[in-house]
Image (cartoon, rainbow, N blue to C red):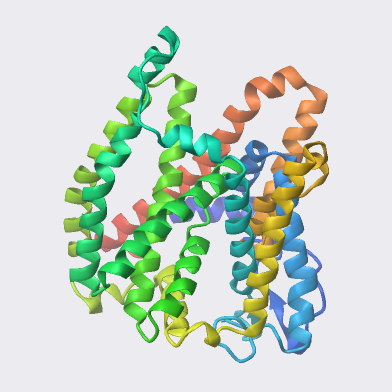
């Protein structure tokens, strides 16, 4: 890690890349600045934008623009953004001590509502597809249908596995976190709904809003389990983890489809991997954090944010700022309207913003949306100039951008952790 640090420092002197290239923003009261307003010099978001496409990327930028340039300044000027609630208003400080506003901490409420209701509305228009996918297999259908049935995952596996897995999840939630059986069953049921939303978000935007999915459960349990932070937090963790896992497995199945893999064998490998992963991860976790004192040595920013929200909602939904509740209402209404317009007037689709994109743009930083748009513009320009070449190489190149930056970041983390364990210094 010592030589790696020196090499990185030498490169940084030749090619200085800041974490964020700031762009002009709106004027805010009391010296506030906006977190994440700029362009992040990296290829991960650009690669994802090349895959996502222009319509969804521009929709994300629209959501972020409205949040950063219209809603946040207006609400801040009228003291309606946080209304005295911690975590919504000036939640961090810059190195010089000035307050920094994180718009997505407020935007997550409207953005999540928009994504959930747009997904459920679009899904309602496809109810026949749902029934066909969930029904038990029937004989006949010709040789092609029988051949597909031999490699696809049988629908009966869902029903056979659903009961014991549900019982197991509810049992462990009850004995470990004292979540009542009815509330545990509700968490499992909500997992199915939020998994649909997460899978749709991943399919359209290549991004899984796990934190946003957890907020839905936290809001529901703020009404059903008041004054109980543990129930609020762990029920949200259950549903968000299930939704995130569903989206991850969906991308695995899609990759296998593109490579010609057998989906039934993929499913079985993933299913058995759960047990091997548990055997490996649980002991490693206990070694890493055997008690609360050991756990608190880590920064855990995401977990701290979830805990803060659970503490806030323990007293009920009324603890949320009124502006956040209105954001939920307005986001839900927009999430209902946009899919209806697409369904009733399908030829308008190219001119109607993607509801999933707009919602996701409100739960991520502006820099993320801008990176997606940059990648989408690269893919669009490439397609206009050399269509056949772009069709052949756009996805492989974009995937290389995403995988390359992710792998390098993971490798650096592993090397730093390994160096720290060996006492090799910072």
Quadrant location of residue 360? bottom right
Q: Nearer the viewer, residue 172 or 101?
A: 172
Instruction: Classify residue 172 as left or right of residue 404.
Output: left
The spot of residue 290 in percent (x, y) is 18, 70
At a point 32% along the width and 39% down the height, the residue shown is: 158
Q: Nearer the viewer, residue 354 or 174?
A: 174
The spot of residue 120 in percent (x, y) is 57, 52
Instruction: Classify residue 373 as left or right of residue 398.
Output: right
- Quadrant in the picture for the N terminus: bottom left
Q: Nearer the viewer, residue 78 or 128?
A: 128
Instruction: Classify residue 38 as left or right of residue 225.
Output: right
Q: Is residue 351 above or below residue 72?
A: above
Confirm whether residue 412 shows in the render. no
Q: Is residue 228 above or below residue 159?
A: below
- Quadrant in the picture for the C terminus: bottom left
Quadrant location of residue 99? bottom right
The spot of residue 222 in percent (x, y) is 45, 78
At a point 43% along the width and 44% down the height, the residue shown is: 248
Q: Is residue 93 above or below residue 234?
A: below
The spot of residue 192 in percent (x, y) is 42, 52
Quadrant location of residue 226? bottom left
At a point 65% along the width and 28% down the height, the residue shown is: 394
Q: How many marks?
A: 0
Q: Nearer the viewer, residue 33 or 192?
A: 192
């Amino acid at each position: 890690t010592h030589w790696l640090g020196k090499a990185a420092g030498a490169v940084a002197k030749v090619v200085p890349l800041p974490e964020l290239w700031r762009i002009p923003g709106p004027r805010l009261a009391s010296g506030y600045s906006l977190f994440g307003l700029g362009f992040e010099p990296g290829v991960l978001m650009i690669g994802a934008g090349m895959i996502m496409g222009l319509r969804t990327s521009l929709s994300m930028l629209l959501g972020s623009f409205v949040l950063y340039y219209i809603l946040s300044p207006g609400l801040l000027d009228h003291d309606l953004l946080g209304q005295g609630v911690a975590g919504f208003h000036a939640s961090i400080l810059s190195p010089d001590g000035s307050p920094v506003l994180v718009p997505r901490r407020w935007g997550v409420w409207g953005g999540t509502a928009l994504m959930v209701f747009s997904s459920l509305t679009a899904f309602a228009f496809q109810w026949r597809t749902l029934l066909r996918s969930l029904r038990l297999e029937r004989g006949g259908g010709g040789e092609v249908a029988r051949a597909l049935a031999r490699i696809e995952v049988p629908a009966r596996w869902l029903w056979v596995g659903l009961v014991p897995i549900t019982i197991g999840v509810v049992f462990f939630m009850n004995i470990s976190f004292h979540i009542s059986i009815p509330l545990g069953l509700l968490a499992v049921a909500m997992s199915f709904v939020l998994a649909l939303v997460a899978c749709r978000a991943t399919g359209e935007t290549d991004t899984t809003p796990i934190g946003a999915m957890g907020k839905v459960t936290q809001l529901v349990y703020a009404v059903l389990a008041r004054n109980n932070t543990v129930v609020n937090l762990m029920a949200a963790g259950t549903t968000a983890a299930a939704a995130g896992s569903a989206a991850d497995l969906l991308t695995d199945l899609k990759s296998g489809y593109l490579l010609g893999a057998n989906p039934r064998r993929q499913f079985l490998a993933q299913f058995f991997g759960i047990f091997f992963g548990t055997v490996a991860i649980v002991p490693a976790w206990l070694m890493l954090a055997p008690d609360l004192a050991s756990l608190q040595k880590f920064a855990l920013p995401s977990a701290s944010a979830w805990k803060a929200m659970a503490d806030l909602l323990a007293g009920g939904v009324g603890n949320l700022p009124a502006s956040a509740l209105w954001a939920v209402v307005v986001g839900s209404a927009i999430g209902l309207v946009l899919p209806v317009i697409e369904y009733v007037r399908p030829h308008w689709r190219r001119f109607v913003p993607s509801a999933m994109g707009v919602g996701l743009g409100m739960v991520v930083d502006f820099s993320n949306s801008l990176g997606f748009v940059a990648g989408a513009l690269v893919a669009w320009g490439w397609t206009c100039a050399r269509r056949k070449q772009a069709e052949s190489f756009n996805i492989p190149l974009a995937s290389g951008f995403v995988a390359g930056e992710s792998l390098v970041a993971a490798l650096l983390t592993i090397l730093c952790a390994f160096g720290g364990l060996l006492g090799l210094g910072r």
